[in-house]
Each structure stands twice: as C-alpha cells, then as structure tokens.
Amino acid sequence: MNPHLGRKLRYGMVGGGPGAFIGAVHRMAAALDGEWELVAGAFASHPDRSRAQGRDLGLDARRVYGSFGEMAAAEAALGPDRRIDAVSIVTPNHLHHPVAMAFLDAGIHVVCDKPMTTTVADAEDLCGAVERTGLVFALTHNYTGYPMVKEARHLVRSGGLGTLRKVVAEYPQGWLATRLEEGGHKQASWRQDPSQAGPTSAMGDIGSHLHNLVRYVTGLEIEAVFAELASLVPGRAMEDDAAVLVRFAGGARGVCYASQVSAGEENGLTLRVYGERAGLVWRQEEPNHLDVLHADAPRQRLTRGNAYLCEAAQRSTRLPPGHPEGFIEAFANLYRNAGRVIGARIAGDEGDPLDHDFPDHADGLAGMRFIEGVLASASREAWVEMAAAGRAVEVPA
C-alpha cells in the first residue's frame, strides 16, 4: 500500500506490448514493493495487439485502449476513486513527448523511460508542462536506483575523494555488432530508425545513461564536449559507437564512450571517479560492490546491505549482504520513491524528503542538452560549449 493513501497507486502503461522487453521490466519493478497496481493500458500501436496484451495481463477489457489519446481522455473522465494516478511510458523515443503531454494535460502524473524526448525543444516543452501542472514527472534512469551508486554519490558529495579531477564513464555492449535490424529484430529496428529513435542511436540509448549517472554521482555540470560518432557496422544509417571528451565546470576532465558494437560485451557500464585523495569504481555487472581506491592505503571493497553504508544506500536495499540484488530492484527503487512522492502530492502531505531521490524533468532536460551538444560537436569536429540556454556553441579556436 502507498503509505500516504492507504491503497495502491493505480497506474496505466503506454507501450510495453507483446515482445517488448522494457515494458515487462517496468511492470515487474512497479509490482515489487506492492505499492502500485496496473489497471489500464494502451500497449501497442495496433488496437488488436493492445487488447491481446491486456488480456494476458488480466485487465478489464474496458480499460485497454487502442491509442494513448483515447486512454488519456477516458481515464481523465473517470472519478478520482477509479482513474489512474500515473502513467508509465515505455514507447520508442519519438512518442515520449506527445504521450507525456497528453497525460500531463489530463492531470495525470508521469513515469517515463529515457531519454526524455528526442529534441531540446520538446524537453523544454515538457518541463513547462510539469511546472504549470505541478504534477510529478519521473524519468527512469534506473542505474541511479542501485544502492552502491547511492553510496558512491555519498562518498563524492561528502568530500571523501577530495576535489574531483577525472571522470571516466564507459558503456560497451556488443548486441548490435551485426545488422540485426535487417532481420526484423524489434529492438534493433526502432533504435536504428531516426523517425523513432530520434537523431541519435547509441548516444540516446545508452549514452544518456552515462550522462545521467555521472551527473548524479558527482554533481558536476558539463561545460564543453568534443565528440565523435561513428557507424562502424557497414551500411548502418545511425551511429553505433560514440566517444566524448568532457570538460566539467570547475576544471575536472572526463571521457565518456558508448558502444553497441563491442563484440562479446554484454552490459559493461562502468563509472570511475578520481579525486585528489581517492577514487572509486562501480561496475553495473557487479552492482553490489563499490571499490574505493586510496592514494596511500590498500583498495577497499564496500558491499551492499551493510550498516556502514550511507542512509540512502541502506534504504534502497531489500536483502542481506551476499544475496545479490540488481536490475529489477534498481528500477523498483525509482518506482517506490516516485510513487511515494505522487501519493504525498495526492494526499496533500509534505512527504519524506528522501523519497525525492529519482531523476525528474530537470534531469531529462539536462540530458537532452548533453545529446544536442554531442551531435553538434560531432558534426563540426570541434569543441562545443554547453550554453545555459541549451544551445550548443562552438568554442573559438
């Protein structure tokens, strides 16, 4: 039950139809703590496929819709004791903006998969709608939900590393090392289609996670980028590999690379942060550990579930040490936190400040500005400043 409402939050889903990977992940994550209940959906662009998914999920057929527009209007017309409290958006990227706008305009809170939109203008439009309506907008950059990422954030923000000097974030995958999109592979097809993915593929898909993770852990804002985007698989229209040099405000330097053609890699997201006194390393494929590197002492390994961790890390842990937690639980932490803020908002309560620990519309806009800067830099083959207004401005030679 939601602690502010004494009932489960009712939610609907747009996307996540038959064969969709991420929709199933969101449904499992939302269900994990027993605080959310799926009651409605527009699961696919074709009404028959949406109805089939609704039947498989055991939903009332009257609340399985043929389009997101129909769903937003019908749910808004229901009384407050029946309508959905929030919508979960798990569509291809190009639909994030119109779907989110439809539900915000209908007075319904939003949980949206990343990236927020495909353009800075659309992201700014959504931010305006969130501010205008006062509704919650949660963005599911799920890696911020891992307990040891929260511990890394605590160590950096509390000064344990000293002044930051270098940040290295890498995300190698190998699943697109061949042209899966030619064989009709659903996930590969839309990610290599600019009409659905937007103007970038690898950078928008996994590079956006790098930006969000670095910003969440370090608190550093990017000042300028120098980027190279490449299509390394012959005949591919959109980039499958990206490398970015980064200058942070305050003087730190960074490297981010996102590749989906690194043969043999699975999901090798790794973050390294180095300060004047110490460094840290977190690997997504070993998420229950955080390595702390000391300049004058042995390497230290911290493990999830222990009482020596910060409050945020302990609060995001469900199992004792040695019982691994991972991908679904990280998503579930975002759903739990966002759900409690939504519940507090509905109930008119102030809520717990610790529950506000999830990416929101401002994080989404920052991510889109980063992507815009990367695209501009790659096009111009030059350093590009990240202007405050979101415009990418070339750095004079």
Image (spheres, rainbow, N blue to C red):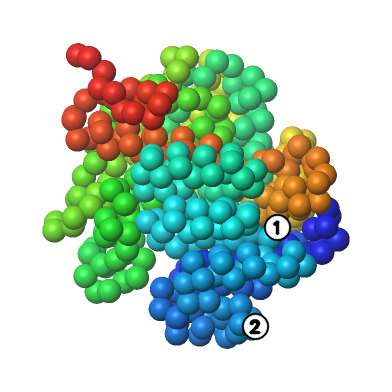
Which residue appears at 34% of the width and 28% of the height? 391
Decide: few, some or many residues near mark 2? Use Cα within 10 Å; few <14, some 14-19, many ≥20.
few
Q: Residue at x 82, y 44 (%)?
A: 349
Quadrant containing the C terminus is top left
Between 20 and 361, the residue placed more toward the observer is 361
- The picture places residue 310, in percent across and down from the top left corner, at 74, 35
Question: Outermost residue, right direction?
Answer: 6
Residue that lies at the very extreme toward the left in this rendered image? 235
Question: Of 238 and 45, which appears nearest the observer?
Answer: 45
On screen, residue 396 above or below 24: above
Q: Do the residues labelled 2 and 1 touch (CB within 8 Å)?
A: no
Asked if 221 appears above or below 63 in the picture, the reply is: above
Q: Quadrant of the N terminus?
A: bottom right
Can residue 40 be seen by looking at this rendering?
Answer: yes
- Residue 60's tag is 2
Q: Residue at position x 24%, y 63% from top?
A: 178
> Label 2 sits on what residue type?
Asp
**Above or below: residue 91 compared with residue 202:** below
Q: How crowded is mark 1: few (under 14 residues within 10 Å), some or many (20 or more)?
A: few
- Which residue was labeled with disc 1? 323
Q: Residue at x 19, y 50 (%)?
A: 232
- Give me the disc on residue 270: none
- Tag 1 secondary structure: loop
Mark 2: secondary structure: loop
